[in-house]
Image (spheres, coloured by chain):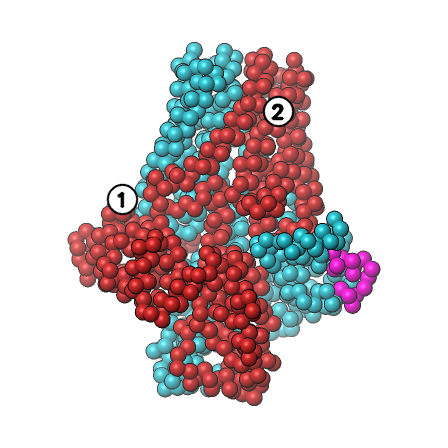
Chain colours: A red, B cyan
Amino acid sequence: MSDDQILANDQDAPEEEAYELNRRDVAAVLYAVDIGDRDRLVDLMEPLHAADIADLLEQINAFDRRRLIELYGVEFDGEILSELDEAIREDVIVVLRPEVLAEAVRELESDDVVDLLEDLEEPQQEAILDALDDADRVVVEQALSFPEESAGRLMQREVVTAPEHWNVGQTIDFLRSAEELPEQFYHVILVDPKHRPTGYVTLGKLMASPRARPLQEIVEDSFRTIPVDQDEGDVAYAFNQYHLISAPVVDADDRLVGVITIDDAMAVLDEEHEEDILRLAGVGEGSLTDRVIDTTRQRFPWLAVNLVTAVLASLVIALFEDVIAGFVALAVLMPIVASMGGNAGTQSLTVAVRAIATKDLTGSNVWRVIRREVLVGLVNGVIFAVVMGLVGIIWFGSPMLGVVIGIAMVVNLVVAGLAGTVIPVALEKIGVDPALASGAFVTTVTDVVGFFAFLGLAAVMLL
Amino acid sequence: MSDDQILANDQDAPEEEAYELNRRDVAAVLYAVDIGDRDRLVDLMEPLHAADIADLLEQINAFDRRRLIELYGVEFDGEILSELDEAIREDVIVVLRPEVLAEAVRELESDDVVDLLEDLEEPQQEAILDALDDADRVVVEQALSFPEESAGRLMQREVVTAPEHWNVGQTIDFLRSAEELPEQFYHVILVDPKHRPTGYVTLGKLMASPRARPLQEIVEDSFRTIPVDQDEGDVAYAFNQYHLISAPVVDADDRLVGVITIDDAMAVLDEEHEEDILRLAGVGEGSLTDRVIDTTRQRFPWLAVNLVTAVLASLVIALFEDVIAGFVALAVLMPIVASMGGNAGTQSLTVAVRAIATKDLTGSNVWRVIRREVLVGLVNGVIFAVVMGLVGIIWFGSPMLGVVIGIAMVVNLVVAGLAGTVIPVALEKIGVDPALASGAFVTTVTDVVGFFAFLGLAAVMLL
């Protein structure tokens, strides 16, 4: 493609491509790396946000990535590291010179260091911990003592508090004279004498209120505390459900131990969704930057499960070999029944899995939802039964074949609605992630029922 | 289930069920509605957040919902309305007495009113607009003049600005003496004389800085403006990518017109993800609260597309009727090849669709990704070819059948990797949402190729 064409493409780019890395910019960076021009590279990278630099590193190949990092040298900062996809983070750390790595990590906030360390192997963890000064290392090690994916890992420990009996003036004077305040904070947390949070006040409200007003009178309604061992997915849910901006984290005795801010909760929400989408498709933790062998390994189990499912379905077909031998049209039509059932089942199960994740499918409405899914399956089943019945009659000239495929279609779509709801709910009850396992079970049911209903009816009605 | 059992269940409830509506609480609310005890109902609802009340209304049936709202009367506030799922919002508005509705809406911030109005029919929109006082109505009508799902609809118009040459002291004095400040704000936006934003300062930094320091010296690095017509999905992406807490919105002349805060961006991110998951499963805009007829209608098109796909695959099978008649084992095994291809294709396409959404799959790496997917398909294909070859030999005692199914498996898994990447990328290029349409195309390809390869090879090699 010539340069002109690339330019034309860029100008025609639809609105959706806002924030996408520009292909020409990437090419310019790679050219600077090719000719080993460090100043040019630094100039080109300077306007990019660390998150965009991380994306760039993910999109180029391993060879270019290594050369780029070596040329970029000391400019490589900690934020890039914390934005990088886990899959290539380790590779990057290996390439970084120890002093660059140490400097990069020292710039980071403690919660970002924790996030970085979690996914690394032991020796790399040590290298990074050693780079921190003592105070930071203690904070990071404490955070790592909380369970993985818990609020304790997510929180920052720097908090701004005020005694609950203070008024606006006292609080402002305290903030104005404080030696050091966190980089980012949006609330002042009110604590009782035992350091238990009892409310919070936004900085905006503080600014807008007369000095004499007690803090108690301007606390936010949305105040909620988060237990330090709560799952990070639930933390993200709480932020989204209750429109929290930040929330105090408390230990088992309700004492304040840290604070979680909405930007971290948003990142978790994003990851959880990503995980759900990939799990529903049987992809596990996949990412574009994984190596072929890792990706193959991640996808293999799901395909293996599917193979078992498919063989089960084949065993059902094998029961009816004689019937098929006597009437080959059955072999032609049977995948249609199974496929429609599989799709309808996937629809129901996806809605159910999402509703479970958003806590909208509960004991209070589960029976109504099941009834609804079965009804939807019945209505769509009847419509497609008529269509397929007609296809059967026209294509193969056999009204009875039309009736058989029609009935099988209704049966399979009703079963799909039922299985697509009951299976995820049951998996959730027994503590298995419904996003991960529902698909295989539901497809097995719709394949087996689809083939059995169609071929069984054919055996009874056609022969 | 007895009361004791319910209690026991609650105590055993795993951590995941934090924030889920308690079944007993729902039952208590419904009992209060049953006996028409308004005081008891109000007492029970009082501790619930508006978002939880909305969830409760979504989870009970239409009859109970109507009775509850009637009994709850004037306590029903605007926030509940704005938390409600669109599917039942209209039903609820119809039930509300006009004066309750008017009062509820008046309490809301202008951006929440806009969000509420967007999805309503004309007469209901009018009713709500009439309830607002003149100033608010003008603001809401202006917001509605921006395109749907744009930054203009998402932003709030109340902003806090300071001339860019001010210092910390001037800004604090201004804030302390301001007549009215927005309910929620986290930054002071610096503007030039033409009201173009040039940076922003967090309230925390403002508090931490000496009075004489110029604002310019404490502006945030993360400063970015959002064009007023930008798609809300891109807005959410920018917040997540660049860790923004709030961002000024500008018109075509770069003048400040409003501000978007991260809580609204998080809600959009959540909706966009939800939409992607449901679209990938062919469910459209489905929700648990939709009526059976609406759900049936939403799911029908995807099933209809799948029927066409399945019939296409059947036409391929029909080409080989004679082959199947001569060797019925083929009918038994052929769904396995198609099913494995379909699953592998779904894996590839899901990864591709997600990577497109997160702007990680671009012109810079598309060829590398395609090559990788094909390789993954090849490796998994070879493994499953061996397994299925053995199954074919053991089950049917025909080594040649084993070879046929093995080759067909490799071919179909390679094609699945190719189609699963190329199809979403191509759809994106021509402006079709890949989440919505990729599934049908990829399955068609893997079904057709799977049946054709398996039966075609069988025709050549077995007969």
Query: As drawn, is A156 to the left or to the right of B293?
Result: left
Question: Which residue lies most toward the bottom here?
Answer: A212
Mark identifier at residue A1: 1
Q: Mark 1 lies on which chain?
A: A
Q: State the count of labels.
A: 2
Kindly identify the residue that appears in the image at 59 percent across and 49 percent down.
A356
Residue A157, which numbered label? Answer: none
Q: Is mark 2 on a helix, strand or loop?
A: helix
Tell me if label 1 and label 2 are in contact, CB under 8 Å: no
Q: In which quarter of the image is the C terminus of chain B?
A: top left
Residue A211 visible somewhere in the drawing:
yes
- The residue tagged 2 is A452
Q: Mark 2 lies on which chain?
A: A
Q: What is the three-letter code of the residue carrying label 1?
A: Met
Determine the residue positioned at 66% across, 59% down.
B54
Using the image as rendered, state which of residue B80 and residue B235 is in the foreground. Answer: B80
The magenta-colored residue range is B26-41
Quarter residue B391 falls in = top left
> Which quadrant holds residue A459?
top right
Q: Where is residue A450 in the image (x, y as percent from the top left)?
A: 60, 28
Q: Which of marks 1 and 2 is nearer the N terminus?
A: 1
How far across and down, in percent of the image, does residue B67 sit?
78, 58
Regarding residue A46, the answer to whether it shows in the image is: no
Q: Distance of mark 1 from mark 2, alpha carbons?
A: 54 Å
Instruction: State the SS at label 1.
Output: loop
Report whether B430 appears left or right of A127. Answer: right
Residue at image point 68% right, 50% down: A363
The crowd level at tag 1 (other Cα within 10 Å; few <14, some 14-19, many 20+) is: few
With respect to residue B386, does A35 lie above or below? below
